Image (cartoon, rainbow, N blue to C red):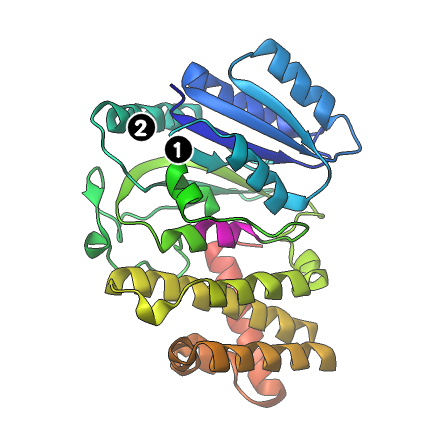
Amino acid sequence: MKLLSVAVPCYNSAAYMRRCVDSLLPGGEEVEILIIDDGSADDTLSIARDYEQKHPGVVRAIHQENAGHGGAINTALRHASGLYFKVVDSDDWVDEAALGKVLERLRHFAANHVDIDVVISNYVYDKVDARRKKVMEYRRALPRGMVLTWADVRHLPLGHYILMHSVIYRTHLLRDCGVRLPEHTFYVDNLFVYEPMRMVETLYYLDVDLYHYFIGREDQSVHESVMLRRIDQQLRVNLRMLNAVDLEALPNEHQRQYLFSYLEIITMVSTILLLRAGTPEADRKRAALWEEIRQSAPWAYRRMRGGLMGRVAHLPGKPGRAVALACYAAAQKLFGFN
């Protein structure tokens, strides 16, 4: 029985994908590594097939026409046979000791017929040239080593959101919620976390530094200059998040608050990027985004607009824009993103 299916979406990843795959191989026969070649033009598919040949029953090389990050995850989920499902991007990697602890816990769940909807672990911002690698952990918000419901989840500090790097979802939950990520669109990792979370009832926090999130390539999708060029894709994801979940209708206050906070931070990222662009077109898009929120989700709009981040993002004139961008720069330095 496969405990864990790991999707490794690859697009022209030949130069760095080996580190990712090699870090997953210590999981042995309990791990299924699904390398999805997303129409690469380099040696990605050849490398994937070589791994498949050397590690039969563990590695599967799957080729598809280019469909983007979301399309590769969709393909992996269709083929996954593991009880749990995780995405590890091809330029990232996992810690071997932490992976062993994760598998030990998943093994325990399977043996005792305990269905945990999402397992959460820490991730490390592995930023190029950074002397100190920042670890994103959840000890203040999530009790460790026990089965949790939303009632047990305390307030997550600013910047400590549960991202794709943190989650291992139960495979059947992902299928039951019908998540299908948009193709040819960046930043869909937010949808991968956000949309299934509405169906999560049980959580488990394993306090290990599993995922190493590499930041440093100039062409990386989270590089600010790249995000500015792809702002329309960021907005597409933002609006889908807005319409994917009726937050006001969620019966559990803790779950509703978490999902609202996630939507709020993504909206603020969109807003600040449009402020950073500083063009009349960007200002029109920013106004259109907030008007859509006002019309589609009045409850969320009132809370966002009246909150600290919403007030800062709407400070008037050039001085207000400067203050908002300065706050964003401070957050970048504090939390290490982009």
- Relative placement, left or right, of 32 versus 11 is left
Q: Main secondary structure of the magenta part?
A: helix
Residue tagged 2: 106
**Amino acid, disc 2:** Leu
Q: Position of residue 296 (x, y in %)?
A: 48, 77
Asked if one can make out residue 136 in the rendered structure from this viewpoint, the answer is yes
Judging from the image, what secondary structure is the residue with disc 1 in?
strand
- What amino acid type is highlighted by mark number 1? Tyr
Q: Quadrant of residue 106?
A: top left
* Outermost residue, bottom side: 317
Question: Tag 2, which secondary structure?
Answer: helix
Quadrant showing the N terminus: top left
Residue 42 rendering spot, x and y as whole percentages: 79, 30
Looking at the rendering, the stretch of residues picked out in magenta corresponds to: 188-193
Q: Residues within 10 Å of mark 1 (few under 14, many from 20)?
A: many
Q: Is residue 12 left or right of residue 149?
A: right
